Amino acid sequence: MNWLAQQDPEVWSAILQEAARQRDGLELIASENYASPAVMQACGSLLTNKYAEGYPGRRYYGGCEYVDQVEELARQRAQKLFGAEHANVQPHSGSDANLAVYLAALEPGDVVLALDLAHGGHLSHGMKLHASGRWFRFISYGVRPEDHRIDFDQVARLAREYKPRLIVAGASAYPREIPHARFAEIAHQVGAKLLVDMAHYAGLVAAGLHDNPVSVADYISSTTHKTLRGPRGGLILCRQEYARLIDRSVFPGLQGGPLMHIIAGKAVCFGEALLPSFRTYIQQVLNNAKILAEELLSGGLRLVTGGTDNHLILADVTPLGLSGAQAEKVLAQCAITVNKNMIPFDPRKPADPSGIRLGTPAVTTRGMGPEEIRRIGRWIVQALRSADDPERLAHIHREVLELCQHFPVPVDGLSELWAVRSGGPSPMGSDQQSNFHKVSNAPRSSSPQTPAW
Ligand SMILES: *Cc1c(COP(=O)(O)O)cnc(C)c1O
């Protein structure tokens, strides 16, 4: 029974169109992924109805015995997955997880060292408009001009000069492994605590294919929806000594009731990441990123750091005579989704920078491997070199669609109600789009049940 289509065709129609978009395009946004049907089912469950302020076994509401089980499963799986002593699975997002760590570790006005936003940092690492930038004194370190790797001499120098209370490691657009121990060493020398924000590469850590920060970091924050491939949300890991402080900072420090349906999705996600198949998936993500990097390099793009050893690539498109914003638009015309991005020491403005950021987590979830990635890389280069040739772009778009049809996307519990399944004909044309709507509004075969409320 599709309650949503029947009750609210406007919302349903937008969801159907998004479903088609996710299916009929190549998602190369490095921070995106496709959550599994099981994750989506948990997130769409009736757990959304439950208030559970507090923590398992010590809630401010009655009736929490079952959601307690859910949160304990999520916590324990997260601890096992990363080898951490304590996990808090309640942060609503990665940014909120960072704020909770700041609340636990800092006083207003304290000095924090973090990666410059223009060199791949995240807005929750002290952007002027973000609460972190307004309440704390963030000092930025950057990457070296010669090789675009983190400048540890600068980190050490700034640490000695400013005596930060906290050093933040982790990035949103850094294509190399982050050596956590080097940050820890510098933090210890100046009496600072270390926060590792592994939002982007948590899946790599979970798979054992990226340095695990657990043994050297005081606090670890993450998202659960990027390489970890779970529901949209946040996560904090820490040693037992900080457990109470972190828990108090999340609730009641920053948040009220936890999103128990999303926490259920996180439990499912951690369960999936504990399986051997997840390591295989992440290994393929890394292989694919390397192959994509090779194709882009041989097509004449400049890559920040010259390549990648994680899931993402930062490419300077100006050698092809385009800006990042133009490149994003051209690729969008071929249903290839990327985001424009600053490159280190970018001479251009943030609104129209020199680069684009690409990642392989989402296309790898669809099952695409070396052969498909090579084709995608060549299409990207061809498209960027044919920015003024609509026919050429239309041709690439058709090839993209044809490829997408062979690699279905995971879908949510309403999938059986979709008119056009993955692998079916392209819904990008208007006739196909209307087919989507037709079926969503079609009479239902089984007799509708009356809701109990
Ligand atoms: C994505 C990201 C976050 C925050 O994620 P949201 O869930 O969007 O708030 C935090 N830190 C880093 C480094 C990120 O890449």
Image (spheres, rainbow, N blue to C red):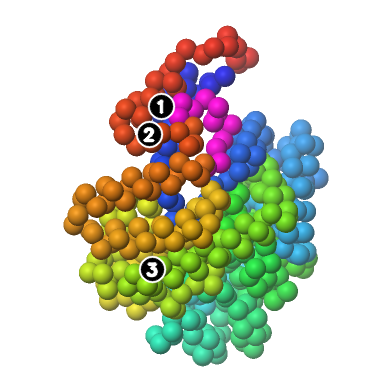
Asked if the stretch drawn in magenta spans residue 415, the answer is: yes
Could you say which quadrant of the image residue 97 lies in? bottom right
Mark in the foreground, 2 or 1: 2
Answer above or below: position of 83 versus 434.
below
| Residue 308 appearing in the image | yes
Answer above or below: position of 326 versus 195.
above
Q: Which residue is mark 1?
A: 436
Q: Which mark is residue 296?
A: 3
Specify which label sits upstream in the sequence, 2 or 3.
3
Q: Which residues are magenta?
A: 409-420
Quadrant including the N terminus: top right
| Residue 199 appearing in the image | no
Check disc 2 and give the amino acid type. Answer: Pro
Q: Secondary structure at mark 2?
A: loop
Dominant secondary structure, magenta: loop
Q: Residue 120 at what x, y percent from top left? A: 44, 70
Assess disc 1: are there few (<14), some (14-19) or many (≥20) residues with their C-alpha within 10 Å of its C-alpha.
Answer: many
Which residue shows up at 65% across the image and 30% down it?
A: 46
Q: Residue 53 at what x, y percent from top left? A: 68, 43
Which residue shows up at 73% across the image and 59% down it?
A: 81
Check disc 1 and give the amino acid type. Answer: Phe
Q: CA distance from mark 2 to mark 1?
A: 8 Å
Q: Which residue is mark 2?
A: 427
Check disc 3 and give the amino acid type. Answer: Leu
